[in-house]
Image (spheres, rainbow, N blue to C red):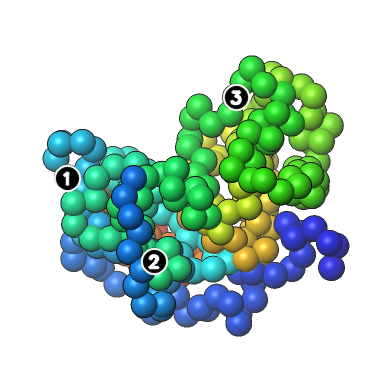
């Protein structure tokens, strides 16, 4: 054990924590308030049968279900316009869920604002505009801990151990960093909240294949600490390769749900969504 929870070998590789069989065989699927306590049980985080959209507009999601267990990596993939990011935002409270619910550790949080969900242990990293470019790397990380009242230095050291380049550039303006380094700052800032769930919207967008592989390696390390990872990703093949659970969305509805390994092996999924 290294003493750094982002490096210790726990979490989604421990079969006692994850469900190695996922949801079974690949199958098509038809397609600021007060939290309400409910009975324990079910996935750690679930957006259950969500139907909704933005404002008063048309529904984008249609009975869409997305879930992730403690210490698992769940990946949402699908064609452009499938509702992947919309499903993520619905789980985080950024749009109206007109039907269905969102539950965290057995608690109904459907009515809570995104800020209240952060306080509950959820962290969201959007695809763009996810850092403060006019602040230093270290100031960005400090901003991530704005709700905390304890000593944040141990967590900051863990982030620097996870992303060593950020330690070297801690005094540099974040806007001067490369695209991959900016993504590391964004993920590191989210980790400063000490989340139970880390939500990533297209974390490898615009980065090189080498940087993408490095980011996926770091995401695996974070999951091994017991943090749940819910991720939208266009690099579907690579993302499913590290996923405990995969969701293929089409037109805002679930098309396939299974383990990442099973989805990669499914000929229909490969032909329709993975380029053969």
Mark 3 or mark 2: whose residue is earlier in sequence: 2
Mark 1 or mark 3: whose residue is earlier in sequence: 1
Q: Which mark is residue 132?
A: 3
Residue 245 position, x and y percent, is 46, 66
Residue 185 position, x and y percent, is 66, 35
Q: Are marks 1 and 3 in contact (CB under 8 Å)?
A: no
Total marks shown come to: 3
CA distance for labels 1 and 3: 32 Å
- 25 versus 71 height, above or below: below
- The residue lying toward the viewer, choosing from 234 and 160, is 160
Viewer-nearest of discs 2 and 1:
2
Would residue 111 appear left or right of 5 to someone viewing this image?
left
- 62 versus 95 height, above or below: below
Q: Residues within 10 Å of mark 3 (few under 14, many from 20)?
A: some
Q: Which residue is mark 1?
A: 59
Q: Which residue is mark 2?
A: 107
Residue 172 position, x and y percent, is 76, 22
CA distance for labels 2 and 1: 25 Å
- The residue lying toward the viewer, choosing from 121 and 169, is 121
Name which residue lies at 34% across and 72% down.
38
In the figure, residue 106 lies in which quadrant? bottom left
Viewer-nearest of discs 3 and 2:
2
């Amino acid at each position: 054990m290294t003493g750094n929870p982002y490096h210790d070998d726990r979490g989604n590789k421990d079969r006692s924590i994850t469900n190695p069989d996922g949801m079974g065989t690949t199958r098509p699927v038809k397609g600021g308030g007060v939290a309400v306590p409910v009975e324990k049980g079910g996935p750690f985080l679930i957006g259950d049968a969500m139907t909704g959209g933005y404002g008063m507009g048309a529904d984008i999601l249609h009975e869409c279900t997305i879930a992730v267990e403690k210490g698992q990596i769940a990946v949402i993939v699908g064609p452009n316009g499938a509702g992947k990011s919309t499903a993520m935002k619905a789980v985080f409270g950024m749009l109206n869920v007109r039907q269905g619910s969102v539950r965290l550790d057995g608690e109904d949080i459907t009515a809570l604002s995104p800020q209240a969900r952060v306080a509950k242990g959820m962290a969201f990293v959007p695809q763009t505009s996810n850092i403060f470019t006019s602040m230093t790397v270290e100031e960005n990380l400090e901003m991530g801990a704005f709700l905390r009242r304890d000593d944040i230095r141990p967590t900051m050291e863990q982030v620097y151990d996870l992303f060593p380049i950020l330690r070297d550039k801690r005094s540099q303006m974040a806007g001067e960093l490369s695209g991959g380094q900016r993504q590391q700052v964004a993920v590191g800032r989210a980790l400063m909240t000490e989340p139970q769930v880390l939500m990533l919207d297209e974390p490898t967008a615009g980065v090189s294949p080498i940087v993408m592989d490095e980011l996926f390696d770091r995401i695996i390390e974070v999951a091994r600490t017991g943090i749940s990872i819910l991720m939208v990703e266009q690099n579907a093949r690579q993302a499913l390769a590290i996923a405990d659970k995969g969701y293929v969305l089409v037109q805002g509805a679930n098309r396939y749900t299974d383990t990442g390994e099973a989805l990669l092996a499914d000929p229909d999924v490969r032909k329709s969504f993975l380029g053969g």
